[in-house]
Amino acid sequence: MLRGISGNVLILGLVSFLTDVSSEMIYPLLPLFLTAVLGAGPAFLGVIEGVAESTAALLKLVSGIWSDRVRRRKPLVLAGYGLSSVVRPLVAVATGPLAVLVIRFADRIGKGVRTSPRDALIADSVDPGLRGRAFGFHRAMDHAGAFVGPLLAAALLATWVSDLRIVFALAAIPGLLAVLLIAMKVRESAAVESAAALPTGDSFLNLVPRGPLRRYLLILLLFTLGNSTDAFLLLRAGELGVSAAHIPLLWAFFHVVKMASVYPFGALSDRLGRRGMILAGWGVYALAYLGFARAQSEWQIWVLFAFYGLFYGLTEGTEKALLVDLAHPAERGAAFGWYNFAIGIGALPASLLFGAIWQQFGPQAAFGFGAGLAALAALLLWGLVRDTHTVRGAPAA
């Protein structure tokens, strides 16, 4: 079942599981804590998330490029996870909304520092023919943590504690375990140390991806502009009769589908090719969005969430595996930096645009717009980016 999962990939998967358990013990409760306990309004919550995610997107680019320059991934991975694990539980002692803003900002700095070097380290640590399997496994562990974290927080509040601050403090335990695993078990890969450096010079323009990699990233950015926050799906679910009590169950069910599908589909991309798997995923996305546009009852929402979860299974690990296939070994960190940056800068306008279309023309138009951009991106991917999954350790031409 886990054939080809190297020690680094296994440990980094466990690290992501523990970190997501820690994060998701806090994150779903944060809006309630800010508004009911600290007296902040919805606008301030938007400021917190906007600042946090924009910071993370920029630092993912910088840290990825830097890890290529110094040819070391582990120090950045350890520093990023360490910072987040230390500051995240400090929400337990926050006395005002501004303190939460600072803590969330520091947490996202940690995420920005670690993400691209971690993904590059996974790529460095696995055989080229097993990249889809490796990234699929990592994403499955991440989703498992996102599923367990809220359930653990809910169980604590239902059976043992009544103060949100205690739950936030207890979230430090899995986070610190993750940091210890990195320090003790993760090893720097020989691949990054031995990769021949690219003659890029110091100009920023020389750091911008070229050729098929650039086309792939631009197509991903286009797709992201139609891929709004999944909060709109929950809003649509509420409109069609899913009760407030059932929304958390629907969300947990959605995570189970993602967790169960991302590893096998990632492994399948090693055998059948990356591009076809991504095209299938984007097709599922477009059909799911058209389904959300036309849905009329609660049972249809549950079916659509299950179907939509397959989009993540088909694409999450496979998109990263194709990125590595297209990148030169000496620029993997930078490639992941640009990948995360493109998705990060596209996410905010995507949600703003989707929300504006919904408000002006209704949910059918908004979901139709998202489906249309997904279809356009799929056509461009099919026509402009070739599959390179059979290449062993060589950059794309």
Image (tube, helix red, strand yellow):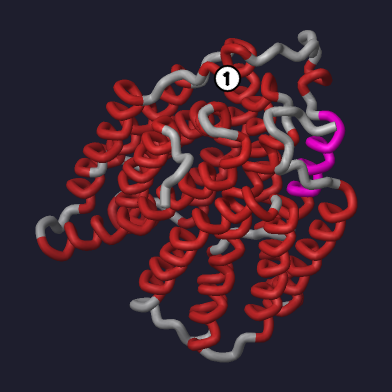
Quadrant placement of the C terminus: top right
In this view, the residue in front, 272 or 97, is 272
In this view, the residue in front, 274 or 57, is 274
Going by the image, does 102 lie left or right of 360?
left
Look at 71% across and 79% down and name the residue there: 364
User: Does the magenta stretch mainly form a helix, a strand or a loop?
Assistant: helix
Residue 215 magenta-drawn? yes
Look at 40% across and 82% down and name the residue there: 243
Going by the image, does 225 lie left or right of 161?
right
Q: Position of residue 160 (x, y in %)?
A: 10, 58
Residue 46 in the image: above or below residue 325: below
How many marks the image carries: the answer is: 1
Q: Quadrant of residue 19?
A: top left
Residue 302 in the image: above or below residue 99: below
Residue 6 in sight here:
yes
Residue 3 in the image: above or below residue 376: above
Look at 68% across and 55% down and name the residue there: 272
Going by the image, does 232 lie left or right of 148?
right
Q: Residues within 10 Å of mark 1 (few under 14, many from 20)?
A: some
Q: Position of residue 313 (x, y in %)?
A: 55, 59
Amino acid type at mark 1: Ala
Q: Secondary structure at mark 1?
A: helix
Q: Position of residue 78 (x, y in %)?
A: 40, 23
> What residue is disc 1 on?
191
In this picture, which residue range is highlighted in magenta?
A: 210-221
Q: Position of residue 378 (x, y in %)?
A: 80, 59
Q: In the orientation shown, which residue stands out farthest toward the left?
A: 160
Look at 74% across and 48% down and name the residue there: 220
In this view, the residue in front, 33 or 296, is 296
